[in-house]
Amino acid sequence: MYLWLDQIYNHAANDESVEMDIGYPELASGDWADGPVYVPGYSVARSGTIPHGSTVQMFGRSSTTDGAPSFPSGLAAWDFRYLAISPTMGGAGNEPINLDAPPPPWVFDKALPATAPSGNKTYTQRILAHDLYPYSVRPDLILRDAIKDQTVKKFSLIEMDTQEATGPQGGILNTPPVRRFVPAVRMDMRMWIETIEEDGQEILQLQYEQIVDFEFHFGTDGGVTRWPHIQVNTLRKRT
């Protein structure tokens, strides 16, 4: 469920809003003209369930921009916020990798499991060696490549997170077995609602990315490993 927060409680009551919101008799036209008026730091909220049966509450913002969304390339795409590899997984050796170039040679070193069984590169080697590289490493790059030859007239971007820097925050409520063994600790989401011009027609297209961070208790040093689970897709409205 999505709720647009910037459209509620942001003005004094008037005859129309009292009637529409069934405010009578508690509210009358002119109430709250002197404040306080609720203007949240975010404009949209989402509540729902995510993989493993956990309940999620997210807050975020929306904006509309002309043209196409901007995605990074090259070394700039190596950003742990959007990678399927986290620093707690060793960060693939903590050396930035150009995801628009072939993987580095160590990715195909079959001796790594024997020579460095607990090494950072060994832990993430198979992610970079996957047939879907570079999307196996940074899934949202497939969204970038899906629109590279499209004419995008404008798009609305909705960004949401279970964590907020200031003010009231969202969160995740895990079921008991999930909380004990592999809790979901954070989720963030981006949606691009795009207007595509194609063959003289305008087409509504949705691209989205959902990142859920799970924490596994099997670090080689007894610590916690945070493993991002990422879903991306490009959808079109059927005409």
Image (cartoon, rainbow, N blue to C red):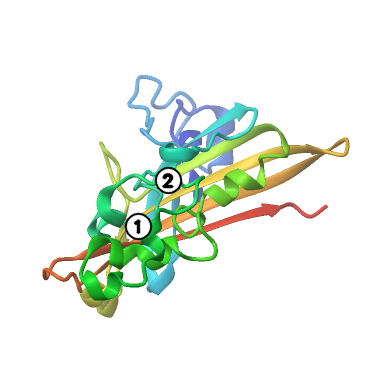
Above-or-below relation of 100 to 233: above
Point 33% across, 26% down: residue? 36
What separation in Å lies between label 1 and label 2 (alpha carbons)?
21 Å
180 horizontally vs 146: left or right = left
Identified by mark 1, the residue type is Ile
For label 1, the residue is 85
Q: Residues within 10 Å of mark 1 (few under 14, many from 20)?
A: many
Tally of numbered discs:
2
**Residue lying farthest top?**
34
Q: Residues within 10 Å of mark 2 (few under 14, many from 20)?
A: many
Q: Secondary structure at mark 1?
A: loop
Rendered image quadrant of residue 37: top left
Q: Position of residue 239 (x, y in %)?
A: 83, 52
For label 2, the residue is 160
Above-or-below relation of 225 to 145: below
Identified by mark 2, the residue type is Met
Q: Secondary structure at mark 2?
A: strand
Q: Position of residue 136 (x, y in %)?
A: 48, 60
Viewer-nearest residue: 61 or 191:
191
Viewer-nearest residue: 122 or 190:
122
Above-or-below relation of 157 to 12: below
Q: Position of residue 231 (x, y in %)?
A: 50, 60
